[in-house]
């Protein structure tokens, strides 16, 4: 490392020692500059390979890995005769026609209280008004509020005014506090002061998420009535349990009224092929498929037809997306391989960068980076392996079975990408860096082949099994071919790397060590010559001192 000491020389000799010492270290400094440039190129080369390798590995590990399997092409499409029901078919859905009936839709429970008015002045009850004095509710009256059904049911006690009867009871004095207590019980609740009504609703749809106020005694019926929370159904049930002929008789006896509106939470019911299914939402998961009720049909007895079949467009997209990703990788590899090597450009030193604008520096470095893999043999080998596989014919699978049948002579029929309308374009139809890209005839997104007849779609529709077998095998061969290029070399490369990452990393370490060694060498040269010049300056200073003393002695 260069010394940080400040050296002052040449004061007595008048020599430009800095320039002299710089001349002694010039060759070493030139080697240092070259070594730093080589290190920078090495780092940029590693970055270039890392970026490309990421894309190659993604094609290998995701797209090709998935497309080797038949499940990648198991795409189903379902249509219904009425938009009231929609179906998302699962991979295991059987092709054919089913029938369904929508018997009910799922809904949340809703309760709207009667309009509440202050008993003293007839004005609409305000949110903060005391319930005991304003509505005449007996102080200490308890509401029993239940959410859920059966094993999941929870009951809460809400007391109107007074001291809490026990620790499980919540005391409220006005409508704001009542709404908050209901919210804590797990429902939505809000008092609309403008209309004088309390609105309560369950947070989820379905019978199991409904709620209710208990009306099992004269006191509870009267309390609910005064709060405007007694609805007709609850009143009828209470009348029956309390021994009245009907709700009218009970209301007459107690002086109560059922003015609340209550809509019970309900389940959706779907009849599918004669079997009945229930759901607390409007969605059903049945045999791997998802059925969604969007509305009730105008005719509740309507039989809705559900038709399931292969989604040919989705299968087409699987192939199209794979070819698109393949092209992205191939085109980038070709561009990197064909790039100008820019051999006359060396990485800039700090001093050179200071003399240039930021744009000039970026442009200079871009020329170097773009050409780092120019003519690279490893890059060529990987790209060529992919091209070779794309041109190969496919006739048999890994077990030697004939994938597409046999010809008249009993030999396996061979098929190529071209048989599916997929091939490279003409030499003069594309840019130089895109000449190895594949084009699908009839692909509306590809200006090169958009106007051609779409063989791929036709074959998917007419013979989906043959098409799927071909692209499964094609993906498998491309997958295996890339694995061979990234299987790893214990000395030069790691697993899943198509380039010699270990070698490049070792070269980086070597350049870093070499730079340190050269810097130490420069420091040693500088120290040696600074010591020599320092000794000379000391001697000259002594000589000048002696001369001055002699002159002074003789009056000179």
Image (tube, grey):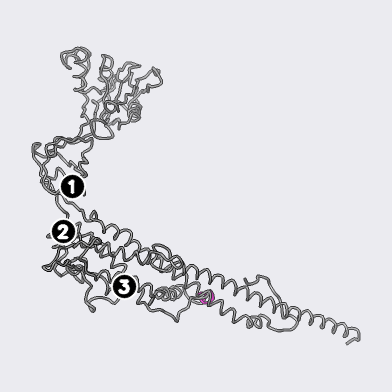
Examine the rendered structure and indicate whether residue 409 appears above or below residue 228: below
Residue 145 seen in this snapshot:
yes
Question: Callout 3: 10 Å neighbours few (<14), some, many (20+)?
Answer: some
Question: Callout 2: 10 Å neighbours few (<14), some, many (20+)?
Answer: some
Residue situated in front as seen by the camera: 167 or 436: 436
**In-image side of 179 versus 280 (left or right):** right
> In the rendering, at what x and y percent does residue 262 appear?
21, 27
Residue 441 seen in this snapshot:
no
**In-image side of 123 versus 543 (left or right):** left
Tell me the distance, in whole angstroms, between the alpha carbons under discs 3 and 2. Answer: 30 Å
> In the rendering, at what x and y percent does residue 322 appear?
26, 62
Q: Residue furthest front?
A: 409
In which quarter of the view is residue 121 placed?
Answer: top left
Residue at label 2?
A: 464
Q: Secondary structure at mark 1?
A: loop
Residue at label 1?
A: 93
Residue range in magenta is 350-354
**In-image side of 263 versus 347 (left or right):** left
Tell me the distance, in whole angstroms, between the alpha carbons under discs 1 and 3. Answer: 41 Å
Q: Magenta part mainly helix, strand or loop?
A: helix
> In the rendering, at what x and y percent does residue 257 appear?
21, 19
Examine the rendered structure and indicate whether residue 275 appears above or below residue 156: below
User: Residue, x 13% and y 67% (percent of image)?
Assistant: 407
Total tally of numbered discs in the picture = 3
Residue at label 3?
A: 384
User: Residue, x 26% and y 14% (percent of image)?
Assistant: 218
Quadrant of the image containing the C terminus: bottom right
Quick one: label 1 or label 3, which is nearer the N terminus? 1
Q: Secondary structure at mark 3?
A: helix
Q: Secondary structure at mark 2?
A: helix
Question: Callout 1: 10 Å neighbours few (<14), some, many (20+)?
Answer: many
Q: Is residue 520 magenta?
A: no
């Amino acid at each position: 490392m260069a010394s940080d000491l400040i050296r002052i020389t040449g004061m007595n000799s008048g020599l430009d020692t800095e320039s002299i010492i710089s001349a002694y270290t010039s060759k070493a400094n030139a080697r240092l500059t070259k070594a730093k440039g080589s290190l920078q190129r090495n780092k940029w080369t590693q970055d270039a390979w890392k970026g490309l390798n990421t894309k190659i590995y993604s094609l290998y590990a995701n797209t090709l890995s998935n497309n080797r399997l038949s499940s990648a092409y198991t795409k189903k499409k379902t249509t219904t005769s009425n938009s009231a029901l929609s179906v998302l078919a699962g991979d295991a859905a059987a092709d054919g026609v089913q029938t369904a009936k929508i018997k009910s839709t799922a809904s949340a429970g809703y309760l709207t209280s009667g309009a509440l008015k202050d008993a003293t002045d007839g004005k609409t009850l305000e949110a903060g008004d005391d319930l005991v004095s304003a509505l005449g509710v007996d102080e200490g009256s308890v509401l029993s509020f239940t959410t859920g059904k059966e094993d999941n049911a929870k009951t809460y006690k809400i007391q109107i005014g007074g001291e809490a009867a026990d620790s499980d009871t919540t005391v409220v004095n006005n409508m704001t506090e009542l709404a908050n207590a209901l919210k804590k019980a797990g429902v939505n609740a809000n008092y609309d002061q403008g209309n004088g009504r309390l609105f309560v609703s369950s947070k989820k749809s379905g019978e199991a998420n409904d709620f209710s106020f208990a009306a099992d005694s004269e006191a509870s019926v009267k309390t609910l009535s005064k709060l405007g929370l007694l609805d007709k159904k609850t009143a009828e049930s209470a009348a029956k349990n309390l021994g009245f002929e009907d709700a009218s008789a009970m209301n007459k006896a107690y002086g109560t009224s059922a003015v609340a509106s209550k809509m019970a939470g309900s389940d959706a019911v779907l009849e599918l092929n004669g079997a009945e299914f229930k759901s607390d939402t409007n969605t059903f998961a049945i045999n791997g498929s998802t059925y969604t009720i969007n509305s009730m049909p105008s005719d509740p007895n309507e039989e809705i037809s559900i038709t399931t079949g292969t989604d040919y467009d989705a299968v087409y997209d699987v192939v199209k997306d794979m070819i698109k990703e393949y092209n992205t990788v191939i085109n980038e590899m070709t561009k990197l391989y064909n790039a100008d090597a820019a051999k006359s450009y060396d990485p800039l030193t700090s001093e050179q960068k200071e003399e240039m604008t930021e744009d000039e520096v970026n442009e200079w470095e871009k020329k170097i980076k773009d050409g780092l893999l120019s003519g690279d043999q490893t890059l060529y080998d990987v790209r060529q392996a992919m091209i070779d596989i794309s041109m190969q014919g496919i006739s048999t699978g890994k077990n030697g079975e004939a994938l597409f049948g046999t010809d008249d002579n009993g030999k396996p029929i061979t098929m190529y990408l071209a048989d599916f309308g997929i091939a490279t374009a003409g030499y003069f139809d594309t840019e130089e860096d895109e000449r190895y890209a594949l084009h699908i005839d009839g692909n509306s997104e590809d200006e090169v082949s958009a106007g051609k007849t779409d063989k791929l779609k036709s074959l998917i529709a007419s013979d989906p099994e043959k098409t799927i077998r071909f692209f499964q095998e094609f993906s498998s061969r491309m997958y295996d071919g890339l694995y061979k290029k990234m299987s790893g070399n214990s000395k030069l490369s790691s697993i899943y790397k198509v380039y010699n990452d270990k070698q490049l990393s070792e070269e980086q370490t070597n350049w870093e060590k070499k730079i340190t060694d050269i810097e130490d060498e420069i420091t040693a040269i500088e120290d040696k010559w600074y010591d020599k010049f320092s000794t000379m300056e000391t001697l000259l200073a002594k000589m000048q001192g002696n001369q001055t003393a002699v002159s002074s002695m003789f009056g000179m």
